[in-house]
Amino acid sequence: MSLVAPYIETLSPYVPGKPIEEVAREYGVPDCAKLASNENPLGASPRALAAIRDALSRIHLYPDGASFALKEKLAARHGVDPREIVIGAGTNEILTLLARTFLAEGEEAVISENTFLVYRIAIQACGRRAVAVPMKDHRYDLEAMAAAVGPKTKLVFVANPDNPNGSYVTKAELDRFLAKLPERVLVVLDEAYFEFVDKSDYPDGAELRRRRPGLVVLRTFSKIYGLAGARVGYALCDPDVAGYLERVRDPFNVSSLGQVAAIAALDDAAHVSATREVTIEGRAVLMRELPRFGFTVVPSVANFVLAEGKDGDELFRSLLPHGVIVRPMRAYGMPNAARVSIGSPQENERLLRALEKLADGSGPLHAVSRKA
Ligand SMILES: Cc1ncc(COP(=O)(O)O)c(C=O)c1O
């Protein structure tokens, strides 16, 4: 007999991007270009780093369990009441909390196939059913998702832009979708990559939420602010929804260093705009150059691109000896694709040079160069 319920027994763990340290150990390449986890190529905001250093002397104290100062700051930024904000250890924690808090027995969540894997894991981990709707041309099919919403549906997850496809839904598409859903359905609009989008028809969830109380908008400090390791994200939502999430979350879910770093990063407009700039430029370079190597690139508005047309696992392995880490997409149901995060200009160049070597056969093969 299994120690756990069948839904835990059959759960596939989330496999993160391969860490730089692991590649250094296995291949003897110390200075990898990690283009596997959509991190910030410029690093963290210098202001955030200074705030972390300042806060270190108080690390023996528990953090403010209410994240009061960060909530106040975000409330002012978004023009909302602090009771409309929930802070989490990354948006990841909030995704898990949403499933735990709102999916009662017998209720379901509607998601898209080939989207961010954490949605499915969060739903299944509490023994609930995820109804996965196929994408259309690498985009969310919101019409089909609306049709999949039934009497048992409590949550709908929409990543905008989507990870790993890099595509987005327009304001008109989202408006039409929301209008079709019953009020009792909570729509989780995950805007982890919000700041990288440069399209005029891209909707701002924080604005839309003013008209639709059942909308839960997620933002993160992991991407544009460069604080992935500090683990801070937040939800903007109705105070009632926030109140329930606050009941379920752990008392000290966000570390003191994460809180001060996030507060400082919010004031670092220069770092945000530099990140945006380097990302948008790098994105154009990779979207232009990757097709030269036989890839089909899905048009992306985020800080990564999805490259299709080669076995993703093989590409991942053959790039490792060149010190380049990409993310194979088999776990996302796309074995012939890899996701490539936009790096610094040097990192993007390194990827392209490695692909050139692989293409002309002069690059080392992983099986040969891998350390014993
Ligand atoms: C769509 C999406 N949502 C949420 C997250 C989680 O981000 P974090 O927990 O670091 O805030 C990610 C991370 O890659 C993501 O791609």
Image: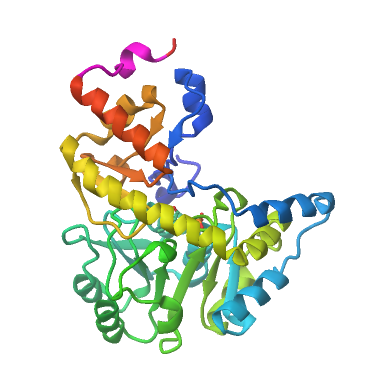
At 62% from the left and 80% from the top, the residue drawn is 76
Question: How many numbered discs, if any?
Answer: 0
Asked whether 156 or 369 is in front, the reply is 369
Task: Give the quadrant of the C terminus.
Answer: top left
Image coords of residue 361 (percent x, y)? 21, 18
Image coords of residue 46 (percent x, y)? 64, 52
Note whether 177 is above or below 190 in the view shown.
below
Magenta span includes 365: yes
Question: Quadrant location of residue 118?
Answer: bottom left
Predominant secondary structure in magenta?
Answer: loop
Task: Give the quadrant of the N terminus.
Answer: top left
Question: Quadrant location of residue 314?
Answer: top left
Residue 89 visible within the image:
yes
Asked whether 135 or 305 is in front, the reply is 305
Q: Where does the magenta region start and end?
A: 361-370
Asked whether 255 or 253 is in front, the reply is 255
Residue 35 visible within the image:
no
At 30% from the left and 29% from the top, the residue drawn is 353
At 55% from the left and 47% from the top, the residue drawn is 43
Image coords of residue 140 (percent x, y)? 24, 65
Q: Residue furthest bottom?
A: 211
Note whether 349 is above or below 73 in the view shown.
above
Image coords of residue 371 (percent x, y)? 44, 12
Magenta span includes 117: no
At 44% from the left and 19% from the top, the residue drawn is 27
100 lies left or right of 367: right
Scheme by which the image is coloured: rainbow
Note whether 20 is above or below 287 in the view shown.
above
